[in-house]
Amino acid sequence: MSLIDVKNLSKEYRNGEVVTPVLRGLNFAIQKGEFAAIMGPSGSGKSTLMHILGFLDTLSSGQYIFDGRDVSTLSEDELAEMRSCSVGFVFQSFNLLPRTTVLDNAILPLMYTKDKRPEWSAKAKAALESVGLGHRLHHMSDQLSGGEKQRVAIARALINKPELIFADEPTGNLDSKSGLQVMKIFQDLNAQGHTVILVTHEKYTAEHAQRILRLKDGALVGDEKVRDRQLADGNGELRK
Amino acid sequence: MHYGNSMHCSWKTLAANKARSFLSMLGVIIGVMVVIIIISVGAGAQSLILNQIKSLGSNLVGVLPGQSEEKGPPVAALGVVITTLKYEDGKAIAQSGNPHIIGVASYVRGIDTVVVGDKKTDTNFLGTTASYINVEDANVETGRFFTEEEERAMGRVAALGSQVAQDLFGNDDPLGKQIKIKRTPFTIIGVMKARGVSGFQNQDNQIFVPLPAAQKLLLGINHVSFMRVKVDSGEYVDSAMDFVKQILRAEHGITNAADDDFTVRSATDGLAALTQITNALRFFLAAVASIALVVGGFGIMNIMLAAVTERTREIGLRKAVGARHSDITRQFLVETVTITLSGGIIGALFGILLSVIAATVAQNLGYKWDLVVTFSSVLFAGAVSVAIGLIFGIVPARRASRLNPIEALRYE
Ligand SMILES: Nc1ncnc2c1ncn2[C@@H]1O[C@H](COP(=O)(O)OP(=O)(O)OP(=O)(O)O)[C@@H](O)[C@H]1O
Ligand SMILES: [Mg+2]
């Protein structure tokens, strides 16, 4: 059974009389443990698709089956439960809480789980250390560099050990070196068994994945395996 | 989400916006403060009245001139001069032979210049009957009180309240000395034991003279201001009141109770009338407090609505990482209640402080005013502030919980 099974998925926005179709009848499946990249020009609907796949937005027509369950039948609380436990999100714009420490930012998703408060800090620390931010725990989020912010966002997405991790342009705001550090983290996560779905418009970044789905004007125009996969190492150096 | 954690978050948010938090609390602070003061001052005033009635004795019946509404304050108490009660009325009650009536005292009051040697002061005097001593359980320190013969004969004799004696004569013995009240000489025959303030009247700073002398020589009037009838025991007070009414009707030639030109009141009736006045005052203050609380509540609702808009992205993020509707609702409710409860605590502290000041001032003025700040009134104020938070917090909290996560995250 596929982890994600999308059938004829469409999404349109309505503003009064104006109807904007954004996604048009998508069909694809993603298996557990895959590392997939979604590519496409700006405005092609990549973020919108990811938000729907991540239970943040709803589709207009078609079907989205996650792990065997039809998502449109889930209640609000069940959706919240999915966001909390099954998926982790790394947003295009980091979306950290301002005036809040790195540690507290990473803790945020734990507040909505059954985890007991005393365990929060240790878990968040471990997650932050795994992205190389063990030395920044008590810094305010506003004082971090772009790459560091993105890594806090990744630690936050990891903290509940979700089986599926979404990353929307995780390297978009970063220089190539920090970009590679971030990609290394995703490749490591994928190696540990997490399914990773990455959105990007850069071919080079997309080639870190195993598979590339191409979107254009809301339609799926390509779906291929990456033959010559890029492998990032932690120092930001290229390694073939 | 855990309550403890919501609380913790709320404190952080509050601390980050100190000035705004304080301003938004102001309505609740004032409201709760007024509630505490009302409860405490109300109870203090009640204690004052109760103490007064205790000191008067619960087996006293008061007779006032003029008719009055049932339970309402007698007209005479509101400062209207009515001349229907006479010296002879008191004598008639005293001589009626009712076995339960053990004393009747009549009173007139005045204030005038008192001259002792070359000292000149304005002093209160009380024209009363010789029965005063018995009716009011007063005692003489030195010398004696005037007799019924002296009273009837319009004797120019006077007994001094302990404070007056001190003021006029210091450590000298006043007995046998002459004083002039309104240029009329009186001989001092006694000094009263100190009684302290009883109710609203300081008993020690007046001069006691025979009632007819006060009427004719000092005031130039023919009526008495009020009378007190002492009954031998509390259980006969009602029958004694009926008896007094009958005597007075006979004296005044009244056949119909509706035409009564006097009011007979027991001490408990007096309590009821005074309680009515204080209750009206408390009701008014309570209304002011409720308005302050409601205004404060709307202020907080407004602030919280603004906070929800300001924190749209935060809410979106929380939902994106798994917060349910109820988690967000709870977070904002706890934040609102944290504000109102903090306001309530500050208000309660100010309220207690002001109550203590009020009681101290009243006690220093000599009133038997008890400081009453009960645990239950503080608890009540706390409950009210929590309730305000819940009532006015629900609208912003629900608005926050209904935000669509993705739209909230896109919000700039
Ligand atoms: N609430 C909305 N109402 C109307 N149109 C919207 C709304 N949200 C997004 N769109 C439109 O949907 C289209 C797809 O947006 P989306 O953010 O998915 O693009 P994207 O592929 O992620 O682009 P980028 O690479 O620039 O991030 C855009 O044309 C956008 O204008
Ligand atoms: Mg996008």
Image (tube, coloured by chain):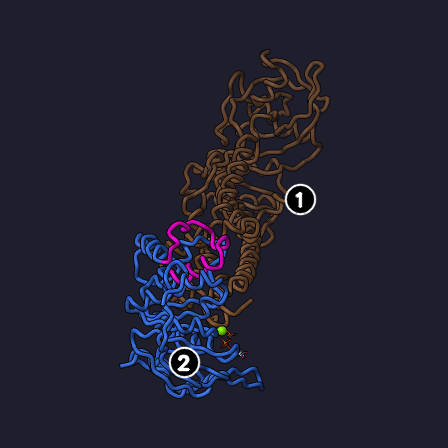
Chain colours: A blue, B brown
Question: In x, y percent, where is residue B359?
Answer: 52, 36
Does dot 1 land on a helix, a strand or a loop?
loop
Q: Residue at x 67, y 18 (%)?
A: B179
Question: In x, y percent, where is residue A230?
Answer: 38, 70
Q: Residue at x 63, y 13 (%)?
A: B177
Residue A8's image quarter? bottom left
Does dot 2 land on a helix, a strand or a loop?
strand
Q: Quadrant of the N terminus of chain B?
A: bottom left
Residue B390's image quarter? bottom left
Residue found farthest to the left: A1
Could you tell me which chain the residue with mark 1 belongs to? B
Q: State the residue in front, B274 or B144.
A: B274
Question: In x, y percent, where is residue B389?
Answer: 47, 58
Does the image show residue B256?
A: no
Q: Let me know if marks 2 and 1 both belong to one chain.
A: no
Q: Is residue A147 above or below residue A3?
A: above
Q: Quadrant of the C terminus of chain B?
A: bottom right
Query: Of the residues shown, which amino acid type is indicated by label 1?
Result: Val
Question: In x, y percent, where is residue B199?
Answer: 53, 35
Q: What's the magenta region?
A: A131-155
Q: Is residue A2 above or below residue B143?
A: below
Could you tell me which chain the residue with mark 2 belongs to? A
Which of the numbered marks, if any, corresponds to residue B80?
1
Q: Residue at x 48, y 63 (%)?
A: A174
Q: State the residue in front, A163 or B354.
A: A163
Query: Of the residues shown, which amino acid type is indicated by label 2?
Result: Leu
- Magenta stretch contains residue B318: no
Which of the numbered marks, if any, corresponds to residue A213?
2
